[in-house]
Amino acid sequence: MDILELMKKRYSAKKYNADKAIPQEKIEALKEVLYLSPSSINVQPWKFTFVQNTGVKAQLAAVSMHNLEKVNQAQLVVVFSVADDLDAFQQIVDTQFPEARRNWYNQIRASKPEADLKIWLSQQVYIALGVGLTASIALGLDSTAMEGIESDKYKEILNMTDFKPLFAMAVGYGAEDDFNRIEVMPKSRRLLDSVIESI
Ligand SMILES: Cc1cc2nc3c(=O)[nH]c(=O)nc-3n(C[C@H](O)[C@H](O)[C@H](O)COP(=O)(O)O)c2cc1C
């Protein structure tokens, strides 16, 4: 299926088939795809936590606002986190980045207030969400982006120290009776001509 067909087909699943297992090789492929996500100066300020464990998923579901059922039903929940302790991230920069990129990052860090640097780092993580949503449908899986999570509680449940959860992505097979299925709920977008400009 070409990319346009895939984008027309994908939708935000609101209800999942909890019993239909995702082949593990698709989950492994999704890990590698997210790992290859692009970011400004290749800064990669992220952590992707793949949660398949039903007990942990239930704990996360309880602190997922209106997404409670999706988190419980979806066979996979990927939590997208951003580097939050900048000194801890500096350790990663100092040990894992080649020199040119390290220098570039250090210049950016020196030039911005900490709050602006953190916004810039978070923006990079959203790029990976776009990659993840597109990769999911390409793998034949349904998905839901979810900003509706309690970040501090996710952080506690996942025992994170240096990273902070920003949002999650449910992945699985949409339920047959999901009201939001593409066959039932046509895509809703602003007028193409007011969004796309061609010069
Ligand atoms: C960053 C982001 C956060 C979102 N958060 C939620 C969420 O918490 N719960 C939910 O059901 N949908 C969530 N959505 C889904 C959007 O509402 C959905 O993508 C949009 O309405 C377009 O519909 P479509 O994805 O079906 O094409 C989120 C989408 C994005 C991109």
Image (spheres, rainbow, N blue to C red):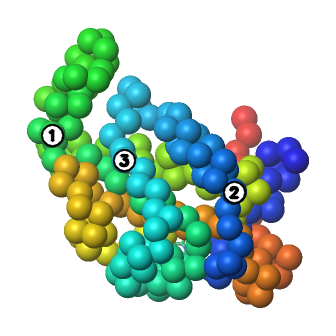
Q: Which residue is mark 3?
A: 47
Mark earlier in primary sequence (3, 1): 3
Q: Which residue is mark 1?
A: 88
Q: Amino acid at mark 3?
A: Lys
Q: Amino acid at mark 2?
A: Pro
**Alpha carbon distance from label 3 to label 1:** 13 Å
Tell me the residue at 79%/82% (across/down).
176
Circle 1 or circle 2, nearest the eye? 2
Considering depth in this image, is 3 or 49 the residue closer to the camera? 49
Q: x and y percent of residue 52 in the render?
A: 50, 64
Considering depth in this image, is 46 or 29 the residue closer to the camera? 29
Q: Is residue 118 left or right of residue 63?
A: left
Circle 2 or circle 3, nearest the eye? 2
Q: x and y percent of residue 131 in the render?
A: 58, 46
| SS category of the residue bearing label 1 | helix
Q: Which residue is mark 2?
A: 23
Given the current orientation, which residue lies at the most extreme top position? 99
Q: Is residue 2 left or right of residue 123?
A: right
Quadrant observed for ligand 1 in the rendered image? bottom right
Q: Are marks 1 and 2 in contact (CB under 8 Å)?
A: no
Tell me the residue at 31%/50% (across/down).
82
Q: Amino acid at mark 1?
A: Ala
Above or below — where is 100 with respect to 2? above
- Few, some or many residues within 10 Å of mark 3 (<14, 14–19, 20+): some
| SS category of the residue bearing label 3 | strand
Above or below — where is 68 with respect to 145? below
Considering depth in this image, is 115 or 3 the residue closer to the camera? 3
Residue 59 placement: quadrant = bottom left
How many discs mark residues in the rendered view? 3
Tell me the residue at 50%/46% (across/down).
128
